[in-house]
Image (spheres, rainbow, N blue to C red):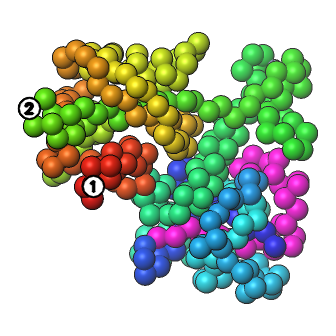
Amino acid sequence: MAHAFVLSDDSILCRQMPDGWWPLQVQLSPDSNDLSEQAYQVGHVTLHESLAPNHWLSDDSTSNDADDTVDANMAHSFTAQATSAMTYDYAVAHNVTLPIIAESSSNTFVPYRKLMTHLPVALSDQISQAIQLLSWQADTQFCSRCASPTVHADQGERAMVCPVCRLRQYPRVQPCVITAITRPNPVTGEMQILLAHHHRHGQQNLPPMYGLIAGFVEVGESLEYAVVREVAEEVNISVTDIRYVSSQPWPFPSNLMLGFRASYDSGDIILQEDELAHADFFDFSNLPRIPPKGSIARDLIDQVAKEQNIDL
Ligand SMILES: [Zn+2]
């Protein structure tokens, strides 16, 4: 039994359920079931086996029919088996039966950004993987050295190979550090966190969104040095006691967010005005609008809040 997510750019075919949109797993017929072959066609990828926590595993007992159908109950029943993903164009070209898709129906394409805040992490990560692999396939159809058309590497390795010069192009992950910087309020002693408002996070009709300092790791840098450099560049302060917390894949386009904590050391905030509109240390009792749950920025902010016995 094989299932596939269907994607269109960074949107996923979903079904509306009582608790929100959930990705549909389109059931593939035995005819279209040869993943070993399909995995190496543009527009279709196999996904790593999910490390799904038990609470959302299905027993898969209802999916024994071989019909090329979409089971409504399956919107919620994700298996722990590796699944696959395909683009909408691929599904149409290969006659995969899709449910009726319309803005007004209960099935539609929903952007990943909207889904990731409520999906279980393992499922969210699997979709993130699908988005990145499909866009990598689309972007590596030609050798970047000699411009010859590429072919897929042998099974088992994700690489696009140039048959002329043998250059191998692998899916690329771009590491990006994001840091929660804290200090006690110099007057009251209350714990504070450094938050910054980016120009690009302006949204009409809403108060400005404040996030953490983040930036790409540069060639030749350690992660810790990237934290120090980014913080110095964006707000001109120095930090100490840098420690890694957790990570999150972020498929826009293929970033790996590496979350850190750090303590304020010295310096006055001076903004890098190209990027930031405002930044300051905020008391936890008086935070501005912060990123939604499900993002690593929010996880880091929540972690500090929890230590202060504050529930955000
Ligand atoms: Zn080449």
Q: Tag 2's secondary structure?
A: loop
Q: Is mark 1 within 8 Å of ligand 1?
A: no
Visible residue check, residue 260: yes
In this picture, is 125 found above or below 5?
A: above
Query: Toward the viewer: 170 or 58?
Result: 58
**In the displayed structure, does residue 182 sit left or right of residue 74?**
left
Q: Residue at x 50, y 63 (%)?
A: 119
User: Image quarter for residue 249?
Assistant: top right
The residue at the far top in this view is 220
Query: Toward the viewer: 217 or 285?
Result: 285
Kind of residue at disc 2:
Val
Q: Tag 1's secondary structure?
A: loop
Q: Which residue is mark 1?
A: 309
**In the displayed structure, does residue 85 sit left or right of residue 202?**
right
Range drawn in magenta: 21-45
Residue 216 covered by magenta stretch: no
Which quadrant of the figure shows ligand 1?
Answer: top right
Q: Residue at x 24, y 44 (%)?
A: 209
Q: Which residue is mark 2?
A: 187
Q: Position of residue 150 (x, y in %)?
A: 81, 31
* Mark sitting on residue 156: none
Q: Residue at x 30, y 39 (%)?
A: 211
Specify which label sits upstream in the sequence, 2 or 1.
Answer: 2
**In the displayed structure, does residue 232 sit left or right of residue 281?**
right
Q: Residue at x 32, y 32 (%)?
A: 181
Visible residue check, residue 102: no
User: Image quarter for residue 90?
Assistant: bottom right
Kind of residue at disc 1:
Asn
Q: Position of residue 153 (x, y in %)?
A: 87, 36
